[in-house]
Each structure stands twice: as structure tokens, then as C-alpha cells.
Amino acid sequence: MYLTNEAKQEAYEYFIEVKKMIFDSEMPEACKNALYHSVDNIFSSCEKINF
């Protein structure tokens, strides 16, 4: 079974929300960049999941 389009859309919406929270934080820029990279990797993995 594959992820439904609704599930992929919901994941994308959370992905955007997390990136906004990182952007709005007061942490050092290097930490933000590392987190952005990690979040991108997680989202890419989720997009490839086939159940």
C-alpha cells in the first residue's frame, strides 16, 4: 500500500510548520542550517515510503 495523497499533503504541511519554527527561533544560524538539513532528509524519506 502507498501513502495516500492526503497523507503526503499532511506530512508536507507539518514539514513547512517545522521549518517555520526553526526559522523563527533564536538559535545560532549554524544550528538552524543543520536542523533544516535533517528535516529535509526526514521529509525525503517519508516521501519514498511505500507500505
Image (tube, helix red, strand yellow):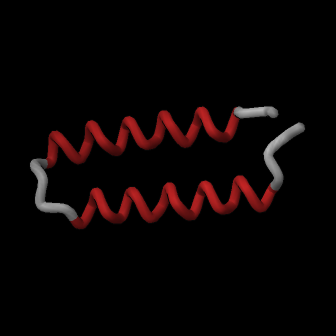
> Which quadrant of the figure has residue 13?
bottom right
Residue at the image position 12 percent from the left and 61 percent from the top:
26
Where does the image place residue 6, in percent across and percent down from the top left? 77, 61
Residue at the image position 48 percent from the left and 34 percent from the top:
41
Quick one: quadrant of the C terminus? top right
Q: How many marks?
A: 0
Where does the image place residue 3, in percent across and percent down from the top left? 79, 45
Query: Which of these two is toward me, 41 or 7?
Result: 7
Q: Outermost residue toward the right?
A: 1
Q: Is residue 32 above or below residue 21?
A: above
Quick one: quadrant of the N terminus? top right
Q: Is residue 28 above or below residue 47?
A: below
Q: Going by the image, does 28 lie left or right of 33?
A: left
Q: Going by the image, does 37 lie left or right of 14?
A: left
Q: Going by the image, does 21 lie left or right of 12?
A: left
Residue at the image position 27 percent from the left and 61 percent from the top:
23
Where does the image place residue 18, in percent across and percent down from the top left? 40, 58
Residue at the image position 50 percent from the left and 37 percent from the top:
42
Query: Which of these two is toward me, 7 or 32?
Result: 7
Q: Going by the image, does 36 lie left or right of 27?
A: right
> Which quadrant of the figure has residue 30?
top left
Q: Is residue 45 above or below residue 25?
A: above
Q: Is residue 15 above or below residue 49?
A: below
